[in-house]
Image (cartoon, rainbow, N blue to C red):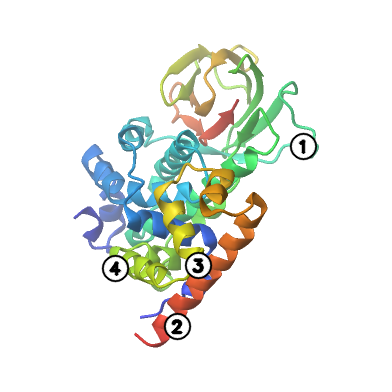
Amino acid sequence: MTRHPTAIDDESLIAALRLASGSDPVPARVTDAARAAFGLRLPDATTARPVATPVPRGVRSAEEPRLLRFTAAELTVELEITSLDGLVDLAGQVTPCPEAGTLVEIRTLHLTESRALSPTGQFAVTGLPPGWFSVVCHRPGDSPVVTSWTRIRP
Amino acid sequence: MVLEVPVSDQRTIDAVPVDDQAAWDALVTRFTGLLWSAVRAYDLSPADAADAVQGTWLRLLESLHTIRDLDRIGPWLFTTAKREASLLSRRHRGERLVADPGEHANAEHARLAPAGAGHAHADPALTVLSADEGRRLWQAVDEMHEPCRSLFRLMATAPDAGVHQLAGRLGMPSGSYGPTRGRCLNRLRTMLTAREATP
């Protein structure tokens, strides 16, 4: 049996001490939320993964919108994120523009907002709570595309 | 137990262990304590720690279809949780509105994928996190001199105490806390290595 304690980083060692001390139990709401996450599963969806967007380093701020781009094989979802008074606004663009009838769902852990896609492939949602979110494109007659879960912090 | 299903057939594996709520709950029960401890080691608040743990489960959720090797779920979750926590603790320094686009997601996929290459190489940290190793760890701590012994006890039992508070309770200047903690951790690692040489 091979073990390599010397390879263990500080955080893991501290984690081991805390776990073994039993003095920092998992709050029930953390376990409950983890269980509930299964309800967010979309088994037949394709996941659009984040790709780098040109953001100048070191100039992020609350006032500047942040652009995120997610791609799946056949679809790109771009999101512009802004925040106001601790809430989050999303403006999205789906390309190439999917057929008419495509519905977009903006999901957080606690609520889901639905939007019909505009003829040019755009959608917007305002006043979302900060935290984890993902966007689902439900295309008529095709499997949904879902963006990878992303965290927006106030 | 869910994780002991034989890993033999692709369809079987896809159907197990996480295609229903009960199987998912079993994973949650088994690993949430581990993940909580992992993210709390980053000096995150309870709210941020909860956020990091939840993010870890969401990552697993979107990677479920790639799971081939059930033995890798534990190490994968642990590594992912540490990364989420690390991102979160870095984000605290100065930035307000930030999205974490999960740039590591693809890299993490590689670890869940099978490639049929030998057995999973468990994260050494996971070994330490087993109950037996935990007892060993605290035995080692009990043999340590001050301030390490008190430092570790405080760190474990007052996870929300800040550096100032911990330093104060140890009677040292705040600036000394970090270096002292580093020295104590190194000493503990050395002790564990020595024990391994002479079981």
Mark 1 vs mark 4: in front: 4
The answer to whether tags 3 and 1 share a subunit is yes
Q: CA distance from mark 3 to mark 1?
A: 35 Å
Q: CA distance from mark 3 to mark 2?
A: 15 Å
Q: Position of residue A4 (x, y in %)?
A: 46, 75
Q: Amino acid at mark 4?
A: Asp
The residue indicated by pointer 3 is A8
Q: Earlier in the sequence, mark 2 or mark 4?
A: 4
The answer to whether tags 3 and 2 share a subunit is no
The residue indicated by pointer 4 is B132
Q: Is residue A138 visible?
A: no
Q: Amino acid at mark 2?
A: Ala
The residue indicated by pointer 2 is B194
Q: CA distance from mark 1 to mark 4?
A: 48 Å
Q: Amino acid at mark 3?
A: Ile
The answer to whether tags 2 and 1 share a subunit is no
The answer to whether tags 1 and 4 share a subunit is no
Task: Identify the residue at horizontal 51%, vertical 63% (top origin).
Answer: B147
Q: Position of residue B138 (x, y in %)?
A: 36, 66
Q: In the image shown, does A12 or A138 lie closer to the viewer?
A: A12
Q: Residues within 10 Å of mark 2 (few under 14, many from 20)?
A: few
The residue indicated by pointer 1 is A54
Q: Residues within 10 Å of mark 1 (few under 14, many from 20)?
A: few
Task: Identify the residue at horizontal 37%, vertical 62% (top origin).
Answer: B129
